[in-house]
Amino acid sequence: MAIAVGLLGAFGMVGPAVTGGATLTTLGLLAISSLHGRSALTGLTRSVKQLGWEIGDRASADRLLGLSTPGVGFDLHLASDIRMTGVTLARTLRNHYAALQVRLAAGATVRIALIAPHEATLAEAARRSTVASNPSMFEHRLRATLDLVDALAEQAATGTGRLEVRLLDFVPAFGLLAIDPKTSNGEAQVDIYSHRCGVPEPTLSLHADRDPRWFGHFLAEFDRIWAIGKPYEHAHR
């Protein structure tokens, strides 16, 4: 439009008023177009930023963390490598006892690391949960867990699976349940312990292919815990 009016003006076919008006109109259209483009760019930038918050490195913690359910909803039925660590693992082991029986019979390897039934360790667990005057609570939970471990050991002895249990002289900072961690389909659930008893705790679900950094971090932590644990001698019934 500007070129056409300019040529008409150059050949004297239109007057200066027409040329000036056309020029101002063209400039106005360009300004409006520029404002529209900036508005669209601002909206796009805002949308991309929001998407980054939702699925990127800055995702909301409410999306990343859930409430701990001691392994409930975690499918062990096809796992060949199962690893657990925690304080007493009372609810976790009870919730998965039947599945562990099946997997041990099918030849799976199960490794469990939990605190030792020693006075000092039980007292530390009680202090960490701010119930220092009641270490017997952890003693009772641990006794129930070790009874289940002994029963699993008897069954594992007659099958092709392998059950290994180690006792810790310290209280681990987190709970972990991992299945097939050395494969690309590995999964893990990390419970972040609170300083209270009987309250829901935050849990983090990790996948080996989706979360390689932190999946590897917690798997390495399990290996360190396992390395310094003392083998548990199963009771004979």
Image: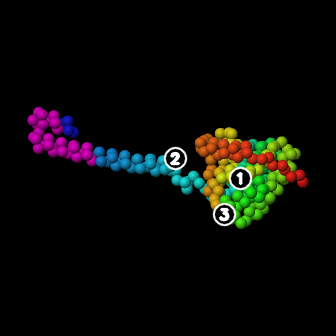
Q: Return the mark for residue 130.
A: 3
Tell me the CA gap for discs 2 and 1.
33 Å
Residue 197, compared with residue 177, is above or below; it is: below
Please, what secondary structure does the residue beneath circle 3 have?
loop
Closer to us: 36 or 71: 71
Q: Position of residue 117 (x, y in %)?
A: 78, 56
Q: Residue at x 17, y 38 (%)?
A: 5
Circles 3 and 2 in contact, beta carbons < 8 Å: no
Q: Residue at x 81, y 43 (%)?
A: 161
Q: Which residue is mark 1?
A: 170
Q: Amino acid at mark 1?
A: Phe
Residue stretch in magenta: 5-33
Circles 2 and 1 in contact, beta carbons < 8 Å: no
Q: Return the mark for residue 234.
A: none
Q: Return the mark for residue 57.
A: 2
In the image, is residue 92 part of the stretch drawn in magenta?
A: no
Residue 171 visible? The answer is yes
Q: Residue at x 66, y 43 (%)?
A: 220
Q: Residue at x 71, y 50 (%)?
A: 85
The label nearer to you, 3 versus 2, is: 3
Q: Position of residue 157 (x, y in %)?
A: 86, 46
Q: Position of residue 205 (x, y in %)?
A: 63, 50
Q: Amino acid at mark 2?
A: Asp
Give the side of residue 64 with respect to residue 44, left or right.
right
For marks 3 and 1 on the same chain, the one whose residue lies earlier in the sequence: 3
Please, what secondary structure does the residue beneath circle 2 have?
loop
Image quarter where the C terminus lies is bottom right
Image quarter where the N terminus lies is top left
Give the side of residue 51 with respect to residue 180, left or right.
left
Q: Quadrant of residue 71?
A: bottom right
SS assignment for the magenta stretch, majority: helix
